[in-house]
Amino acid sequence: MEYILTTDRITKRYKKCTAVNEVSIHIQKGDIYGIIGKNGAGKTTILKLISGLIYPTSGSVNMNCKVGALIESPGFYSNMTAVENVRLKMTYSSIEDKGLARELITLVGLDPDSGKKAGDFSLGMKQRLGIAMALVGDPELMVLDEPINGLDPQGIVEIRDIIHKLNKERGITFIIASHILEELSKTATRYGIINDGRLILELSNEELNARLSEHIIMQVDDMVKAYAVLTEKGYTSVKRDTAGHMYVFDKDADSADIVEILVLAGVKVYSVHKNKESLEEYYISVTTGKGGIR
């Protein structure tokens, strides 16, 4: 298995605060690796350690590749155009242009001929410019911190499409930190779940889907009676929430059979459908042991 980046028990302490605690991650070449965690979990600190913006208190980062990074917010000159900003970064990096600045701006979906100043860009356009600038130097690994935070739905789709395009057409590996888990689930191929500075779990998209439980959700007129009837009939994983929903988690449970049992018992069933646990629900269950269902 070819890893483009690994960390060996990296730890970052700030006086008495431990932001990252002995984290060992493994990113394969070609991954879109999603770091999942709530605000303050240590996601940005890990990205800064990987990018070399800060140094670990202990542990090590091991990689042999060129890295491009967009962490927190894009840095650019607001009185310059997109192409001018990219050209300036190329100058700082001792890279000759030869049309590359226009190519990168076009690649991220901006107009290289526009005279619009970066300070007048929308949030989505600024994110695109930030990605273009991170691409200077032809990186093999791109580090993105909350790349869709604050974007409208169209902007989110556009950034997602750019990531997929760079991953498939240029073979760029990505490590993306986000707390917007529903969107991350549409992009990532592997995940690292972070909680309170610790890495709890690493798993592939296939492994995640295998762990996400399917269940039946119902609304009934008498939850107490419905619960009693179903447990009496041998269903062992029946749960309720405070919003008036009942859940049946038994493997291979059939919704038609359950409705028939309840109706024959005199319980009215207002709605029933099958649902698969979301990435957000799974994250909550592995970090807190609670998914909001009792």
Image (cartoon, rainbow, N blue to C red):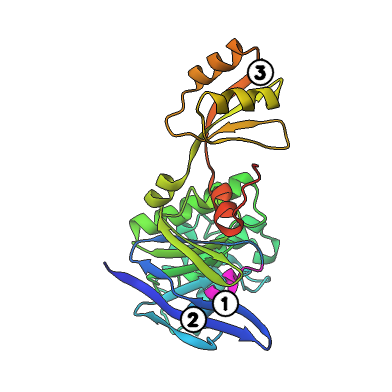
In the rendered structure, does residue 45 fall within the stretch colored magenta? yes
**Closer to the observer: label 1 or label 3?**
3
User: Which image quadrant: the C terminus?
Assistant: top right
> Which residue of the protein is positioned furthest toward the front in this rendering?
232
Q: Nearer the viewer, residue 47 or 95?
A: 47
First in sequence: mark 1 vs mark 2? 2
Horizontal side of residue 229 vs 65, given as left or right: right
Q: Main secondary structure of the magenta part?
A: helix
Disc 1 residue type (three-letter): Val
Horizontal side of residue 229 vs 8, given as left or right: right
**Closer to the observer: label 3 or label 2?**
3
Mark 1 secondary-structure assignment: strand
Residue at label 2? Answer: 10
Residue 181, given in percent of the width and then of the height, sits at 57, 52
- Say which quarter of the image contains residue 203: bottom left
Residue 292, given in percent of the width and then of the height, sits at 66, 45
In the rendered structure, does residue 58 fall within the stretch colored magenta? no
Residue at (68, 71) in percent of width and height:
79
Horizontal side of residue 18 vs 277, given as left or right: right
Q: Which mark is residue 6?
A: none
Tell me whether the residue at label 1 lies in contact with that at label 2, contact meaning CB atoms closer than 8 angstroms.
yes
Residue stretch in magenta: 40-47
- Measured Cα–Cα span from mark 1 to mark 2: 7 Å
Mark 3 secondary-structure assignment: strand
First in sequence: mark 1 vs mark 3? 1
Disc 2 residue type (three-letter): Ile
Residue at label 3? Answer: 270
Residue 54 visible in rendering = yes
Q: Nearer the viewer, residue 45 or 83?
A: 45
